[in-house]
Image: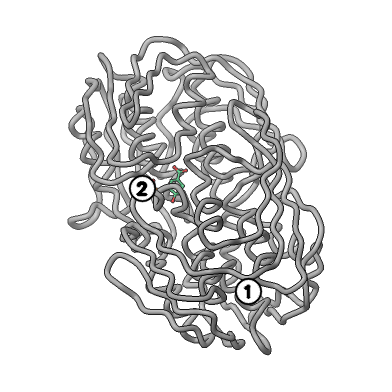
Amino acid sequence: MKLTVRPAGPVRGSVRAPGDKSISHRAALLAAVAEGRSRIEGFLQCEDCLHTADALRALGAHVDPIGTDTLEVHGGGLASLRRPSGPLEMGNSGTGMRLLMGLVAGRPFHVTFTGDDSLSRRPMDRIAEPLRLMGADVEGQGERLTPPVTVSGGSLRGITYETPMASAQVKSAVLLAGLSAEGETTVIEPAASRDHTERMLAAMGAQIEVDGLRVTLTPGAPLQATSMQVPADISSAAFLLGAALIAEGSDVLALDVLLNPTRTGLLEALEQMGAQIEIGETREIAGEPVGSVRAQFGALQAAEIGGDLIPRLIDEVPLLTVLATQAEGTTVIRDAQELRVKESDRLSAMAGVLTAMGADITERQDGLEIIGPTPLHGAEVDSLGDHRVAMSAAVAGLVADGETIITGAECIATSYPTFVRDLQGLGAERVEEKDDQ
Ligand code: S3P
């Protein structure tokens, strides 16, 4: 599918982006090994999360969609997980695969995980290393253990593990394996990554202690089923807010946005850029802070973004590069080499997309330099099968001269199936999906 985007003036109005992807994965997964019936409202029905739900079903859990955004899960405890009859196909979802690898590592059977072309290039050695230290066997392809990967689980022992990179997927996989290990499991991170697993485990009755960058799980307490509402994904709302910041005359209010401090790095970067952002009063939903965020068009200045801020805005870097093309000065993004092992190499993908659209952007080994402001022009660009690259290109297209064509745009359904509809609802009516041919 192609997405064609033509500039159409301001985006205006209020919108609730769909449920948070990271929380939706975790809610389904933990509910499947909790005891009793859980109800997850606002569950994100995107391709990634649906792959996780299917995988949980194949492992024996009862996972039932109710309507378009609720999931009911009947869990029977960790011991209820069964050997699946075939490989678990995880599509594009690194989070689904990595978290499930941790969850099944303590079960006495083999599970093979497969993925699409993009996921089949992503390294699983970062998960294999701690799981092997805990006593599981993990096999994959080549040096970096890319999928298909097979986890042969069994009795695990708790470990203390220092993650080489700030990764919530690695941290979560180790903690989930720790649920069925003998003794405590501690994970120490070099910088804070998203902490939804810790929050949800605590809310469901697990014994978990957080001390700065150190998390310790003591296994034994059964997880209790829960009912929760999933807040709107800040990583999806970001595209609508970003469009408002650069399309003249825009004013967008995003509702119920997840404002967990491990996810709000983008808002801090935008503050540095002088963006007109207002954050409403925060309240709690499902143990997570949530509030509205308003973005208005205005002048932007360049910023330097790196260090501990990077893990807190890791998925928003592609969008930030687009905003930087419209900011005055040189924006420098550094310490962001993890972006090279996402759904695509996002540093090179965004350099390619924005260069084709007339931006002044230079790729560095660990980041990007963007000199702005530059007028963008429409071009035909390839999403490289990466949802966040496709949506970032669409936002750039809203302020580019002429028509922007994004090929391979079906990948947007990976995380944000209603993206085009939501943009159109804010007035960007010249964004259209077209079948290939
Ligand atoms: C995620 C963690 C991040 C993020 C991804 C979702 C999660 O990945 O980029 O989109 O839900 O745990 P890493 O753990 O590789 O940093």
The C terminus, quarter of image: bottom right
Residue 6: quarter of image:
bottom right
Query: In this figure, which residue is indicated by the disc labeled 1?
Result: 1
Residue nearest the viewer, comparing 382 with 149:
382
Cα distance, mark 2 to mark 1?
A: 37 Å
Image: 422 above or below 311: below
- 114 left or right of 424 in image: left
What residue do we see at 41% from left, 37% from top?
100
Task: Name the spot of residue 3 as percent of width and height, x first.
Answer: 66, 75
Which quadrant of the rendered structure holds the N terminus? bottom right
Q: Which residue is mark 2?
A: 308
Using the image, determine if residue 343 lies above or below residue 375. above
Q: Nearer the viewer, residue 124 or 364?
A: 364
Q: Earlier in the sequence, mark 2 or mark 1?
A: 1
At label 2, which amino acid type do we have?
Answer: Asp
Residue 436's image quarter? bottom right
